[in-house]
Image (cartoon, grey):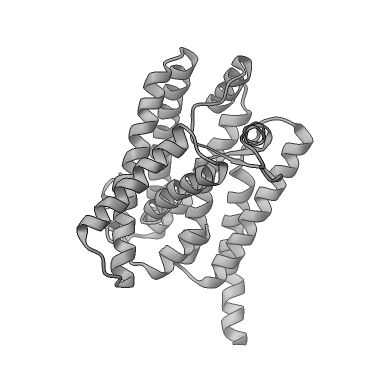
Amino acid sequence: MCIVIFIVRTITLPGQDTVSSAMVYHESASDSTAARFFGSILNALIFVALIILVTIIFVCLYKYRCLKIIYGWLLLSTGIMLGFFGGFLFYQTWSTLNWPMDWITFAILVWNFSVVGLVSIFWRATLRVNQFYLISISVILAVVFTRLPEWTTWALLAAIAIYDLFAVLCPSGPLKVLVETAQERNEPIPALIYSASITTMMADEEEDENKRRGVKLGLGDFVFYSVLVGRAALFDILTVFTCFIAVITGLFMTILLLALFQKALPALPISIALGIIFFFVTKIFLLPLVITLG
């Protein structure tokens, strides 16, 4: 989240019009409040519908053991994310900071970054390297999503949190089915999962054991946490602090509930709800008060 805040506040990225053109409703500052409200809800519902469709396809492929298709899908999407979008973000960062670099060096750096990332995620690497690349992917995705229009972003965050609640807790929810199928087969879920362990790893065997026992979060959780904080960073630094605290507080509450119930729980609803509430409370009440006192 801190990296996303830095990028959003210091680097101007082109492409907001391109991202907005992919939406059904094209948000404009001249639109009425009602038009932006219902238009943003329409965009969010379509986006969530696409996520549901992709998730159902993923669950069906896993249920019928089409693992080659799944890993091919993940390899292709991850390679594009690291190579194309990561290279673009790397180029924009270098250009904004005005650091000199020739194109050959740039191509070699992006190539190595992408190849090492694929190896560390899908084959073998230390836990720290694996976490670094998973965080890198979440940063890249979050920066892309911060290019969405403001109203659409907030509607999307609320909609995705509600979807996460039903997908994980409902008896026939796609994520619940995926987790239960993996538990029945006693095998890891073929997805981009961030593994966070509290203990220090001293050997490969201990590291593998910690990966199995540690707290695991889907990469989408990190992405939407960062989108929320990134959107707050586009408004004011005060909203950044309050939203950051809200997201971390929600994550701690989710981990506490996880320890109490000992089963898979959605990681988005509490953090996103607190983040949205804190943002608008800060924007409407706290920020004017600080400006007045200042």
Q: Residue furthest left?
A: 103
Q: Residue furthest top?
A: 64
Would residue 180 be found to the left or right of residue 95 on screen?
right
Is residue 88 placed above or below 65 in the rendered structure? Answer: below
The answer to whether residue 29 is visible is no
Quadrant of image for the C terminus: bottom right
The answer to whether residue 285 is visible is yes
- Tell which of 200 and 274 is nearer to you: 200
Residue 200 location (% of width, % of height): 69, 46
Is residue 98 placed above or below 156 in the rendered structure? Answer: below
Q: Residue at x 48, y 21 (%)?
A: 59
Q: Residue at x 61, y 72 (%)?
A: 285
Would residue 155 be found to the left or right of residue 209 on screen?
left
Is residue 125 placed above or below 84 in the rendered structure? Answer: above
Quadrant of residue 151 within the rendered picture: bottom left
Quadrant of residue 260 within the rendered picture: top right
Residue 135 location (% of width, % of height): 49, 48
Q: Residue furthest bottom?
A: 294
Q: Residue at x 50, y 54 (%)?
A: 226
Residue 65 location (% of width, % of height): 46, 14
